Image (spheres, rainbow, N blue to C red):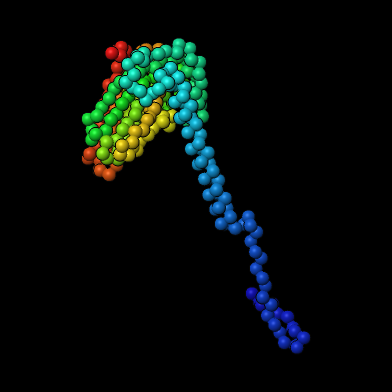
């Protein structure tokens, strides 16, 4: 391509250098990259806040029939269980869907396990609830039609090591033979527990076959735990059977 020249007053030819046009702001790659990062961060924060709200809402609804002081599992004056025969409550799940809760029943339990590395696992409340039928995505079976849920309230105290509870992998068996994976998205889990600390969790299990709140005489809960600084060879499996129909002595 020929270079452009102009003739000066002195009769000499001078080369003309053309200035390249600057890209407009919306044509710059780093502008769009920055906007994408900002939008992604805002979306992630909004989703995290939504999940937090769902967990708080679910915990509040399912514990309504329980004692107001859930930290006192040794309160001998409390009733073994309490019932709300017509709760007529609605819960919004983490996927945005809503389920109608028909009846709930809370059992005050006193299961404890101190057998592993000075830790203390306590299951102090179990709530059963019947609902209108709804569809839930199970990690093993995919979309499943559910008719209720079981919520298990527990607290975990670490001993002389920092611990991790793998509650997001918990499995529950009912006395009538159903086996259900935890609904980790709608549960409220405290998985990392440091030395001397206590953390509470509410584990939620969606139940496919459920017609009444006193359908189960017991539940069996299995989950793993391990010291944070050790390898998986030192992992411990908790295997808790909790009675739901025996009077508290």
Residue 228 falls in image quadrant: top left
Q: Is residue 229 left or right of residue 56?
A: left
- Any part of residue 95 in sight: no
The residue closer to the viewer here, 84 or 208, is 84
Q: Quadrant of residue 245?
A: top left
Q: Position of residue 110 (x, y in %)?
A: 30, 20
Residue occupying image coordinates x 27% and y 33%? 119
| Position of the C terminus by quadrant | top left
Q: Residue at x 49, y 23 (%)?
A: 91
Residue 1 sits in quarter = bottom right
Name the residue: 66% across, 70% down: 19
Query: Residue 101 or 119: which is nearer the viewer?
Result: 119
Taking 179 as reference, is 246 above or below it? above
Please say if 248 is above or below 47: above
Q: Is residue 225 left or right of residue 95?
A: left
208 is higher (above) or lower (below) than 189: above
Q: Is 94 situated left or right of 115 in this image?
A: right
Q: Nearer the viewer, residue 138 or 3?
A: 138
| Residue 53: image location, x then y, percent | 50, 31
Residue 196 visible to an observer of this rendering: yes
Q: Residue at x 39, y 27 (%)?
A: 202
Residue 154 x, y percent position in the rendering: 35, 27
Q: Could you say where residue 48 lies in the image, as x and y percent from the top left?
A: 48, 38
Disc tally is: 0
């Amino acid at each position: 391509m020929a270079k452009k020249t102009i003739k000066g007053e002195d009769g000499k030819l001078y080369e003309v250098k053309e200035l390249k046009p600057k890209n407009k702001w919306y044509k710059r790659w780093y502008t769009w990259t920055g906007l994408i990062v900002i939008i992604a961060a805002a979306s992630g924060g909004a989703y995290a806040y939504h999940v937090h709200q769902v967990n708080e809402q679910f915990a509040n609804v399912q514990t309504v029939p329980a004692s107001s002081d859930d930290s006192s599992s040794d309160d001998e004056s409390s009733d073994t269980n309490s019932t709300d025969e017509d709760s007529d409550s609605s819960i919004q799940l983490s996927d945005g869907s809503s389920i109608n809760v028909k009846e709930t029943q809370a059992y005050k339990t006193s299961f404890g396990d101190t057998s592993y590395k000075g830790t203390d696992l306590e299951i102090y409340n179990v709530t059963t609830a019947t609902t209108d039928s709804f569809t839930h995505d199970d990690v093993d079976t995919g979309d499943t039609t559910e008719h209720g849920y079981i919520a298990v309230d527990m607290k975990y105290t670490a001993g002389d090591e920092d611990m991790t509870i793998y509650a997001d992998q918990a499995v529950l068996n009912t006395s009538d033979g159903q086996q259900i994976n935890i609904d980790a998205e709608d549960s409220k889990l405290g998985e990392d527990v440091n030395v001397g600390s206590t953390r509470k969790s509410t584990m939620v299990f969606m139940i496919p076959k459920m017609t009444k709140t006193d359908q189960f005489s017991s539940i069996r809960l299995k989950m793993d735990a391990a010291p944070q600084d050790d390898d998986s060879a030192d992992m411990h499996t908790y295997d808790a059977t909790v009675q739901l129909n025996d009077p508290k002595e």
